[in-house]
Image: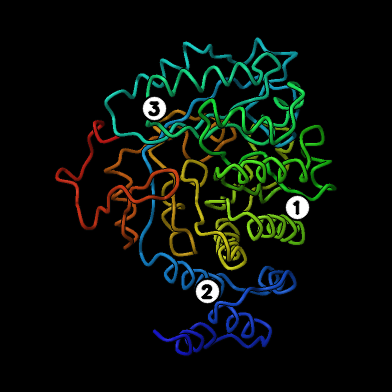
Amino acid sequence: MSDTAAVKLITAHVQDKALVAIAEKVLNNERITNAECLTLFEKGSLGFVGSLANYIRERLHGDKTYFNRNFHIEPTNVCVFSCNFCSYSKLYAHKEEGWELSTEQMLDIVKKYDGQPVTEVHIVGGVHPKMNLEYFADLLRKIKAHRPDLHIKGFTAVELDYMFRKAKMSNAEGMKYLHEAGLDSLPGGGAEIFAPEIREKICADKVNAEGWLAIHEAAHNLGMHSNATMLYGQIEKFEHRIDHMDRLRTLQDKTKGFNTFIPLKFRNMDNDMRDIKESSLVEDMRLYAIARIYMDNFPHLKAYWPMLGRQNAQLSLAFGVNDIDGTIDDTTKIYSMAGAEEQNPAMSTAELVQLIEQAKREPVERDTLYKEIRNYKKEPLADPMPAASLN
């Protein structure tokens, strides 16, 4: 379909001239402004923004939908910080209510996957004062010594900021130290919403926006890649979402170090913001679509399926999303403890492939940096369902 035909199709029933102008810019591969993004949030229907986002998604990736074979290690949920939205952590003063894994226990988790074709371990948890920079550097070295090919994606900027300050290292020094110990890339957690007036109310005591961005920039400067997140659907307004995405887009212009943008839905179970109603499915899909339109320099948009649920993650593939994360293997509690759809988040490779194919998309297994490992349209599974051995 030509761009002209696409414009006519997408804007056929749109009367608002501002929306038509935005569609023309998007279809001409031109960047939209913050003001235009606000117009999309205020006036763009689900069908309109979804059509634009899907056009971008297919222009970038066709029908390819990525996932990887991964597992999580959560060293502790004991934390020195007290974020109001968090259902996961236990304050250090009440650490007996939480868990603390030893290095040996974490290595045992890694060893459980010996002989299995997993490509990534994702390490995040609470900020524990005794789990310092050297503690985690030692863990990284031991994981790499045991399984050198395993990509280690670890530690939010919140965890890293605490480690670096405690070790009296700069961001550049701390990142270099952990990178040399075996850290390959960073997840995107801890970003929440960058606006200080929102951060003050939901996570006042942890690293601010400037600190979060500086740590990711330090990683990018070492040639490392990272992800970026945004916690939406709590007390923020449209303007705060746009400010957040603008800061990420600006850093990406500078470093080109982000792999993917991951909107994370606020969940209200068992936390200090439980009185806030969660966003609707329509608003979730609108957010994904508008993010895909605005974040034009991010190659990928991910829907984290344990948080959204399988069916909703599948639906998001029509709204700009081209990645649904990985097998997980029931190794994360962060969202299940907050009331997410998936209380036991694990899917086999066969189940992920089937979920993607049901949405008429093309399942592609990737590594952390989006190198294609296997295209299941070209190389279908011999035994399509189910099999734990396919994890």
Which secondary structure, mark 3? loop
Labelled disc at residue 236: 1
The numbered mark, 1 or 3, whose residue comes first in the sequence reads 3
Residue at point 59%, 28% (across, down): 178
Label 1 crowd bin: few (<14), some (14–19), many (20+), radius 10 Å: some
Which quadrant of the figure contains the C terminus? top left
Q: Compared with residue 209, is residue 110 higher up or lower down, i.e. above or below?
A: above
Q: Which residue is mark 3?
A: 148
The numbered mark, 3 or 2, whose residue comes first in the sequence reads 2
Q: Which residue is mark 2?
A: 52
Which secondary structure, mark 1? loop
Using residue 296 as the reference point, say whether residue 244 is left or right of it. Answer: right
Badge 1 amino acid: Glu
Residue at point 58%, 15% (across, down): 99
Query: Horizontal and vertical percent for residue 382?
Result: 14, 45
Using residue 214 as the reference point, say whether residue 184 is left or right of it. Answer: left
Mark 3 vs 2: CB contact within 8 A? no
